[in-house]
Amino acid sequence: MPLSEANAVLVLFAGALGDFLLALPALRLLRRRHAGQRLVLGVRAPLGALAERAACADAVAALDDPATAVFLGGGDAPSWWLERPGLYSWFGGDDPDVRGRLAAHAASAHFLRVERGAGSVHAAAAYAASIGEMRSWE
């Protein structure tokens, strides 16, 4: 069955390798939540091959390509940006200009934080909780 482009999902994750590995369960939960919808995962270029192998998206895009900078500066969206996607972004949430630019090109937008420092729960559980998935980690 072809994937639906009408309600496609874009996930932006700007964390480094360790952050990506900790977020991987949450990224896979998003893939499962949006089964049947096209899902594109934007990561930093060095993580592209790993993200592809992790099978948590239909396509992987490089967040740090020049087209992204042009887009954030007011230009056209990069070729990998889906038409009015549902957006989950671990990128730009603390910058009102970036947040506004991303949200203006999305049907819905959820801005999340890359986990930093000591917390009351394991970072992987915090990433899952940030997308509304309360899982038992026992």
Image (tube, helix red, strand yellow):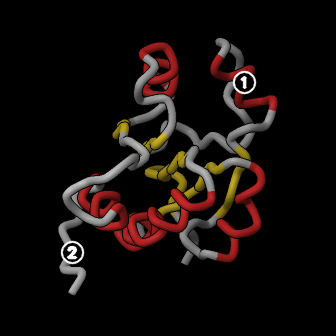
Q: Position of residue 84 (x, y in %)?
A: 49, 37
Which residue is at a point 46% across and 19% down the rendered structure image? 95
Q: Is residue 30 above or below residue 74?
A: below
Which sits in the foreground, 60 or 48? 48
Which residue lies under the disc numbered 2?
135
Tell me where residue 65 sits by quadrant: top right
Q: Earlier in the sequence, mark 1 or mark 2?
A: 1
Which residue is at a point 37% across and 37% down the rendered structure image? 111
Q: Residues within 10 Å of mark 1 (few under 14, many from 20)?
A: some
Indicate the secondary structure of the residue bearing disc 1: helix
Which sits in the foreground, 4 or 21? 21
Left or right, 5 with respect to 136, comes to right
Quarter placement of the C terminus = bottom left
| Label placed on residue 112 | none
Which residue lies under the disc numbered 1?
69
Does the CB distance between marks 1 and 2 fall below 8 Å? no
Which residue is at a point 56% across and 39% down the rendered structure image? 83
Look at label 1 and name its amino acid: Ala
